[in-house]
Each structure stands twice: as C-alpha cells, then as structure tokens.
Amino acid sequence: MRKPLIAGNWKMNKTVSESIEFARDFVKAVSNVTDRDILICPPFTSLYPVSEIFNGTNVRLGAQNMYFEEKGAFTGEISPLMLKDAGCSFVILGHSERRHIFGESNELINKKVLSAVSHGLVPVLCVGELLEEREEGKTFDVVGSQLEEGLKGVSADSEFVIAYEPVWAIGTGKTATPELAEEVHRFLREKLSELFGSKKAESVRILYGGSVKPENVDGLMAMNNIDGALVGGASLKVESFVKIVNFGR
Ligand code: PEP
C-alpha cells in the first residue's frame, strides 16, 4: 500500500515571519496525523527557520527547486548540500513554472533529479501537458517523455515521487476530473513499470496537482492511482491545507 503524501508548494509567497506563523499553527493542527505523509515547500529564504519548527514533528520540509552542482560560481543558485543543511528532505523539480517561465529542459531537470537522489533528497518530479497539447491529443506523449527523460539514469532503488500537474489546471481554478486525472496516472504507472519493473511502479507515489481544494480532494484521492496531492494556492492558509491533509475523514 502506498502511503498518501499531501504536499504544499508555496511558490513565491510568504515572508520569513509569515512562514513561521503558518508553521507554528500548522504543526499543532496536524500533530495527530499518522496515516499520511505531509510535506511543505516554502521559498528558499524560509527553509531554515521553518525547519526549526518542523524538526521532530510529522511535517517534512522540501524546496521548490535546486541546481545540480554542489557549489561554485553559479550566481543565484542553491545546491543540494545547502538544501540538506537547511533541513530539507524533498525537492520539487521540473515544476511547470520552471519549465515554461524559466525555460528548463528535460535534460536540465534530469541532471537535477540525479543530483537530488545522489545527495539523499527525494525529488518530486512534475510532469504535465499544456492546454494546446491536450487539445492536440498529445498528453500521453508529453507526460511520457517528461517522465522518461526526467528519470534517465535513476536506479530503481532510489526514492522519488511523481506529480502529474496538467498546466491548464494550475492556479486556474480548473481541476481535472478525478476520472481524467486517473487516466493519466494509470498511464504514468504503466510507463514506470516499463522503465523500472512492476514492483517499483506499484510503490511510487504519483500525486495530482492543479487547483486542489478541500472541496475536490476527496474525489481525486478516491482514485486507485492517485496517491496524494501537490497543492499550490490552497496550501497558503492553515485552515484549507489542514482540511486537504485530512481528506476523506
Ligand atoms: C502547484 O503549484 O503545483 C499547483 C498545483 O498550484 P495550484 O494548486 O494553485 O493550482
């Protein structure tokens, strides 16, 4: 059985003091949750102060991006060693905003994924199609190659998480129906099975992301191949994110 993972991606939101206030209230509100994993990915500036609050609790810390080198002349970048030092155990890689606003390629994302696993960080590899790609019937081609190229060279014994995030559903209020999301999740699991074997494919958590809210999370989480959620907007308020963490109750 795959343990559900509910992850919050704060994107470029919250100052250090806002992050600390959220973290203090949130850890109290979810302290009794044991049957699902919880992850929050604040902006870089809030990682260390938030890690001091999450330390020893059931809430894990992740970053939203990283560079693949350990150190050096890479102005503006953050390394896997720095993320580990700041208390992170996860890192989101290949988010559609990184791909489409900052031009990240599958090749670059693959280097980051390989670097994350080799440093003991669990990558959350995001894949997802644009609206026009869906309309042209290219969804499976796009997400299939993002998955295959993003995971090139990764060994089956490394831990990683996949997030399916249709770009047309991110921050737009348009959620994929549970059935439509499940169709892509099933395809991704089959693809994982081709790449890594069925045992590994059955153990990988595939999250859904794209306007997940307290009102729609139950329907999505009821699907066989949806193992959690990557939540943007609705992870910014303690009340709504706690409701999402407690889906199905
Ligand atoms: C995201 O940031 O990955 C995301 C899915 O955002 P939202 O929930 O706001 O659509």
Image (cartoon, rainbow, N blue to C red):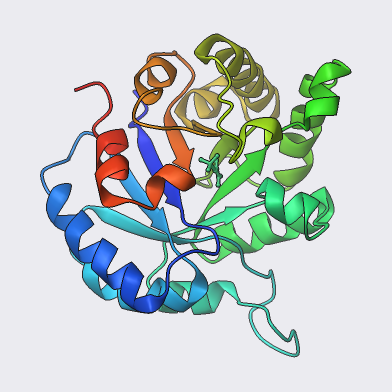
User: Is the residue 114 above or below the residue 47 in the image?
Assistant: above
Using the rendered image of the protein, determine whether residue 139 is visible from the camera's viewpoint.
yes
User: Is the residue 117 above or below the residue 179 in the image?
Assistant: below
Using the rendered image of the protein, determine whether residue 57 is visible from the camera's viewpoint.
no
**Residue 248, image x and y in percent?**
25, 21
Q: Residue at x 38, y 14 (%)?
A: 222
Image position of 118 (left or right of 167) = left
User: Going by the picture, which residue comes out furthest to the right?
Assistant: 136
Q: Residue at x 57, y 38 (%)?
A: 162
**Residue 72, image x and y in percent?**
71, 89
Report the quarter where the N terminus lies. top left
Image position of 180 (left or right of 215) = right
Q: Residue at x 45, y 29 (%)?
A: 203
**Residue 227, image x and y in percent?**
43, 27
Depth check: give the residue in front, 103 or 227.
103
Q: Quadrant of residue 67?
A: bottom right
Q: Residue at x 41, y 43 (%)?
A: 234
Report the quarter where the C terminus lies. top left
User: Is the residue 128 above or below the residue 138 in the image?
Assistant: below
User: Going by the picture, which residue comes out furthest to the front?
Assistant: 173
Q: Quadrant of residue 138?
A: top right
Total labels: the figure holds 0
User: Going by the picture, which residue comes out furthest to the bottom?
Assistant: 73
User: Is the residue 233 above or below the residue 85 in the image?
Assistant: above
Tell me the quadrant of ligand 1. Answer: top right
**Residue 232, image x and y in percent?**
49, 46
Depth check: give the residue in front, 13 or 220.
13
